[in-house]
């Protein structure tokens, strides 16, 4: 069953102040695919081999039935290849043109035989495939010069016709000739079987004969219908030569085109993107109706099977117009404000004239009311991690949220959303402050920090993201200076341990790899405390004796926590006086 829209409007359809049509289930019209399949089945049931292909030259949509990728004897269909090569190589003039016109309109065999060698003979199919970039049309005849036995497929023929339809240099001449096909061929055979007997306004090239290896009759009806929009190929083989197989093609064509046309007048298009921002779903896409290529369409949206809202296609889509030969505006954008819970949203293009409405696509958008948000930046300085980001709850779009930080699963601090984020307000249609900045202390070693936004209204708190960190288990610091004063040197610097940043730690000074001084950090270093956000005394300055000659002085910070070890803070090389002590 296909959903069709009726003109009935109910009270339930009054949504957001507009009236939208109610969807009711009605019998679906036959599709091109089902009609083609029925036509092939009709022939198969009567002992015929058959294939049908239909290609919409506006949309590129292809439909095939039967063995449409298998080859049949082309019979006189090869004549459209001969004419195409004459046109594409500049040979369509004078006697060539006179003969070619008779070859197409009257299916004249003598003209075809005379022109066949002028277009490459048995290589004509390969040339056409390459020149028009249409692979798999078929192949040359099994015996040299036997042009009626050239092999073609139904799918290849309609793709050939589609390529020709979009080449004015070929189409203007060939299309005109095919539109002027005569009821009888030059051999007296009635050639208006198949497509010409089922419709009007056709452009056709027919083929008939028994040029296949099985020796069976092969009758083909191909060309354009529906104002040259659809390329059609009906290839059938078997039965008795003459009226029986010709009548079979006519019956097939009438099954394929009930009412005298390819009955696919439905709009077509698609959804280009679904974007969820809070409770707003923004839908972008396009739609065209083949019966109104210059008119905009209405796009209706249903949520959970109920009418919700609609939009007109008012946005220019030059790419769509260029591809389908349309004019006007055929793009649309619509933002839908959804409720908490399950939301199945479907977009439909509303048909104009003959045909049915078309479903462009559906999207499931579950909303549980929980906050949205994210982490924008993460920085680490020593044991201090700082996060910035945003949080937003569409149940309270104008209210700041609380953001909580957990370090290794334990509470480590919280902050309100106090930073202006106009981008978030614009995206989610909110006001107020929705940005945050929060800093947390990290323990020595490895740790993971996760941020959560606390919920307002329905839903639950949401994790905004997590980041991993590593803080040194060993002390950090630096040997700032070594000042020589006679036979002594003053060694100064700073150090602390992340295991307890407010505690003074031990310092060891080595001279030439031997301990010569040790003790705690006892000097205030405001610059260190400020830089690392800590407290306590972390500076040191020790005086040591120098040995005569070369002295290598090194300072170490002594570890106070589990794990880690003492840290080298730096070394300096100085020279002691000749009379220095030991």
Image: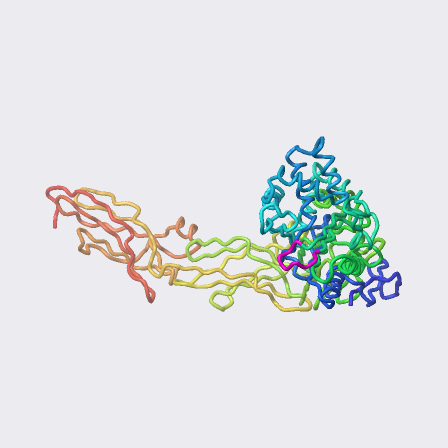
Q: Which residues are magenta?
A: 211-218
Front-lying residue, 39 or 582? 39
Front-lying residue, 434 or 161? 161
What is the x, y in percent for residue 514? 17, 55
Residue found 28% across the figure and 56% down from its top: 507
Q: Is residue 577 above or below residue 251?
A: above
Residue found 67% across the figure and 56% down from its top: 274
Question: Quadrant location of residue 6?
Answer: bottom right
Q: Is residue 98 above or below residue 567?
A: above
User: Residue extending furthest top?
Assistant: 94
Question: Quadrant location of residue 31?
Answer: bottom right
Residue 337 in view of the camera: no
User: Residue extending furthest left?
Assistant: 579
Dominant secondary structure (helix, strand or loop) of the stretch shown in magenta: loop
> From the viewer's perspective, is 91 left or right of 4?
left
Front-lying residue, 547 or 5? 5
């Amino acid at each position: 069953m296909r959903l069709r829209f009726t003109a009935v409007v109910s009270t339930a359809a009054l949504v957001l102040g507009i009236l939208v049509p109610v969807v009711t289930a009605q019998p679906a019209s036959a599709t091109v695919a089902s009609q083609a399949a029925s036509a092939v089945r009709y022939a198969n049931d009567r002992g015929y081999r058959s294939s049908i292909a239909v290609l919409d030259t506006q949309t590129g949509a292809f439909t095939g039935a039967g063995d449409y990728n298998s080859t049949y004897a082309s019979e006189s269909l090869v004549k459209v290849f001969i004419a195409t090569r004459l046109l594409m190589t500049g040979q369509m003039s004078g006697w060539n043109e006179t003969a070619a016109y008779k070859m197409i309109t009257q299916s004249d065999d003598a003209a075809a035989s005379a022109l066949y060698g002028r277009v490459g003979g048995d290589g004509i199919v390969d040339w056409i495939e390459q020149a028009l970039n249409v692979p798999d049309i078929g192949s040359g005849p099994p015996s040299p010069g036997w042009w009626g036995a050239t092999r073609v497929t139904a799918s290849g023929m309609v793709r050939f016709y589609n390529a020709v339809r979009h080449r004015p240099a070929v189409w203007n001449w060939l299309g005109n000739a095919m539109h002027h096909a005569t009821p009888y061929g030059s051999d007296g055979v009635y050639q208006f079987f198949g497509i010409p007997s089922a419709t009007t306004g056709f452009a056709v090239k027919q083929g008939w004969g028994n040029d296949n290896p099985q020796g069976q009759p092969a009758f083909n009806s191909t060309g354009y219908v529906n104002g040259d929009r659809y390329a059609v190929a009906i290839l059938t083989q078997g039965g008795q030569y003459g009226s029986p197989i010709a009548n079979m093609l006519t019956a097939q064509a009438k099954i394929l085109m009930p009412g005298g046309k390819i009955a696919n007048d439905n709009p077509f298009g698609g959804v280009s993107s679904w974007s969820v921002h809070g409770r707003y779903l923004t839908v972008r896409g396009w739609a065209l109706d083949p019966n109104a290529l210059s008119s905009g369409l209405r796009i209706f949206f249903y949520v959970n099977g109920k009418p919700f809202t609609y939009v007109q296609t008012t946005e220019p889509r030059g790419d769509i117009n260029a591809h389908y030969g349309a004019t006007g505006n055929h793009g649309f954008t619509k933002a839908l404000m959804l409720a908490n819970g399950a939301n199945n949203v479907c977009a439909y293009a509303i048909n104009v004239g003959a045909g049915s409405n078309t479903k462009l696509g559906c999207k499931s958008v579950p909303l549980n009311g929980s906050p949205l948000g994210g982490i924008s930046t993460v920085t680490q300085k020593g044991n201090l991690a700082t996060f910035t980001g945003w949080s937003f709850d569409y149940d309270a779009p104008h209210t700041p949220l609380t953001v909580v930080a957990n370090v290794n699963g334990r509470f480590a601090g919280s902050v309100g959303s106090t930073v202006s984020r106009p981008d978030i307000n614009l995206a989610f249609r909110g006001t107020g402050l929705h940005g945050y900045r929060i800093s947390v202390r990290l323990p020595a070693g490895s740790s993971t920090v996760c941020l959560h936004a606390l919920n307002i209204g329905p839903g639950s708190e949401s994790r905004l993201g997590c980041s991993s960190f590593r803080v040194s288990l060993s002390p950090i610091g630096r040997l700032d200076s070594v000042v020589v004063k006679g036979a002594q040197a003053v060694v100064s610097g700073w150090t602390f341990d992340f295991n307890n940043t407010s505690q003074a730690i031990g310092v060891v000074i080595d001279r030439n790899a031997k301990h010569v001084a040790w003790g705690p950090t006892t000097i205030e270093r405001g610059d260190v405390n400020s830089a690392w956000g800590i407290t306590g005394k972390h500076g040191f300055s020790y005086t040591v004796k120098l040995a005569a000659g070369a002295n290598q002085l090194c300072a170490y910070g002594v570890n106070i926590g589990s794990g880690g070890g003492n840290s080298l803070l730096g070394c300096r090389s100085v020279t002691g006086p000749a009379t220095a002590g030991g």
